[in-house]
């Protein structure tokens, strides 16, 4: 009996259970374990991200992992306008990935799984041939040479990060940056735009390793923060910055790591007005001076899917004593765990909301130190902006 891996944060609905009954062994996916290890052999992945706290992000992560395997996946997708992003992503990935409505009948699902099982051997063979071809006629590179190249790549990527965090008015920054491996799929920047304005962002390329790291370097160079107009200049609003970056990524048609998330903020340090836009990224956390914790929400899907995707701009007024936290999803997974029973960022940060800036960073950073039994499965990036009292 062949295995079907149910990749979802929810339980299989009745149409799925009826479709696999008596024909396939249905196994539950573990989000804290590599997907490739759970698939193995001739297993077919049945993916359903609808209802997840962050469906587009989960979709991108699953796609990234599937790219490294020879497994065929069937995606259950809702037939709604909001799901068009997912349909658009998968329309580019013909052959290995199949789509079907989440409301399909058991018989329709059964037929789709049969089709996936039939093409599985061919996809696996092609995957093995591709791996062999990448090794070259003389075989894979020497391990020492590869280590040196990765070391150089790590140094190059760090050269793209700010060497010094600007201090403008009452605003002070701190950063925690922990790549999972040699290089990171995360990128951040904090830039002084003029005498009173600061621009800062955090972006996360879907996946790990060199493909994701290369996309972060592209983001660093492509994201527009300020335009020079003769002897004058214009500060580019976050919504325009993300829209233009999205078009640039789509135009590149990157095959190995085409998607990323980002949140970009512009802060006026005089009146403390913050303007921000978000593209599929975890919502920033704002800890008010009195201890109240807020999420800064705004709509927007991943970058690199539709070139004409519309993002939104939001505003909020900060105050003396406030603390703003931008972070990647690896932080949330490490602090809060996985699955529907996991706690949220608000709960994780609640016990530290009254700490001074240095103590806050020290406590948070200590949780991300590498330990043999830790839960860190992703790159870690945190940007903290404090408005001093």
Image (cartoon, rainbow, N blue to C red):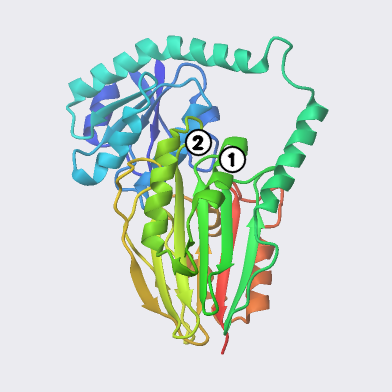
Q: Residue at x 31, y 19 (%)?
A: 113
* Quadrant of the frame with the C terminus: bottom right
Q: Residue at x 44, y 20 (%)?
A: 43
Question: What residue would you read off at disc 1?
Answer: 214
Using the rendered view, name the quadrant where residue 313 is placed: bottom left
Question: What residue would you read off at disc 2?
Answer: 257
Instruction: Tell which of 271 and 178 is nearer to you.
Output: 271
Q: Earlier in the sequence, mark 1 or mark 2?
A: 1
* Quadrant of the frame with the N terminus: top left
Using the rendered view, name the quadrant where residue 106 is placed: top left
The answer to whether residue 89 is left or right of residue 149 is left
Q: Relative to 96, is 199 above or below?
A: below
Which callout, 1 or 2, points to the residue nearer the camera?
Answer: 1
Q: Position of residue 84 (x, y in %)?
A: 25, 40
Q: CA distance from mark 1 to mark 2?
A: 9 Å
Mark 1 crowd level (few <14, some 14–19, many ≥20, 10 Å Cα): some
Instruction: Tell which of 23 and 246 is nearer to you.
Output: 246
Contact between labelled residues 2 and 1, with CB atoms less than 8 Å apart: yes
């Amino acid at each position: 009996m062949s295995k079907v891996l149910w990749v979802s944060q929810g339980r299989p609905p009745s149409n799925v259970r009826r479709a696999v009954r008596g024909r396939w062994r249905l196994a539950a996916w573990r989000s804290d374990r590599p997907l490739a290890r759970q698939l193995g052999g001739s297993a077919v992945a049945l993916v359903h991200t609808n209802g997840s706290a962050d469906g587009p992000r989960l979709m991108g992560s699953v796609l990234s992992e599937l790219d490294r395997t020879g497994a065929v996946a069937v995606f259950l997708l809702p037939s709604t306008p909001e799901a068009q992003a997912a349909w658009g992503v998968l329309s580019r990935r013909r052959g290995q990935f199949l789509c079907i409505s989440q409301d399909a009948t058991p018989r329709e699902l059964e037929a789709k799984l049969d089709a996936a099982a039939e093409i599985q051997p061919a996809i696996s063979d092609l995957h093995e041939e591709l791996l062999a071809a990448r090794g070259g006629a003389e075989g894979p590179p020497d391990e020492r040479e590869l280590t040196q190249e990765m070391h150089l790549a790590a140094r190059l990527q760090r050269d793209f990060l700010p060497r010094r965090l600007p201090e403008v008015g009452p605003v002070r920054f701190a950063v925690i940056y922990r790549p999972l491996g040699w290089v990171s799929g995360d990128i951040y920047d904090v830039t002084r735009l003029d005498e009173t304005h600061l621009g800062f962002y955090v972006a996360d390329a879907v996946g790990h390793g060199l493909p994701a790291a290369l996309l972060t370097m592209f983001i660093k160079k492509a994201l527009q923060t300020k335009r020079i107009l003769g002897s004058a200049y214009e500060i580019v609003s976050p919504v325009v910055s993300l829209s233009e970056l999205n078009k640039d990524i789509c135009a590149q048609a990157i095959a190995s790591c085409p998607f990323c998330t980002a949140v970009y903020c512009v802060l006026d340090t005089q009146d403390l007005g913050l303007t921000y836009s978000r593209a599929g990224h975890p919502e920033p956390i704002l800890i008010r001076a009195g201890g109240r914790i807020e999420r800064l929400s705004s709509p927007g899907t991943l970058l690199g899917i539709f070139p004409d995707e519309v993002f939104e701009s939001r505003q909020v007024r900060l105050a003396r004593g406030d603390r703003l936290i931008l972070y990647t999803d690896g932080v949330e997974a490490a602090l809060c765990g996985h699955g529907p029973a996991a706690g949220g960022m608000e709960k994780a940060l609640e016990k530290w909301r009254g700490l001074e800036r240095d103590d806050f960073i020290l406590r948070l950073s200590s949780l991300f130190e590498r330990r043999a039994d830790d839960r860190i499965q992703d790159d870690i990036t945190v940007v903290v902006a404090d408005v001093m009292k």
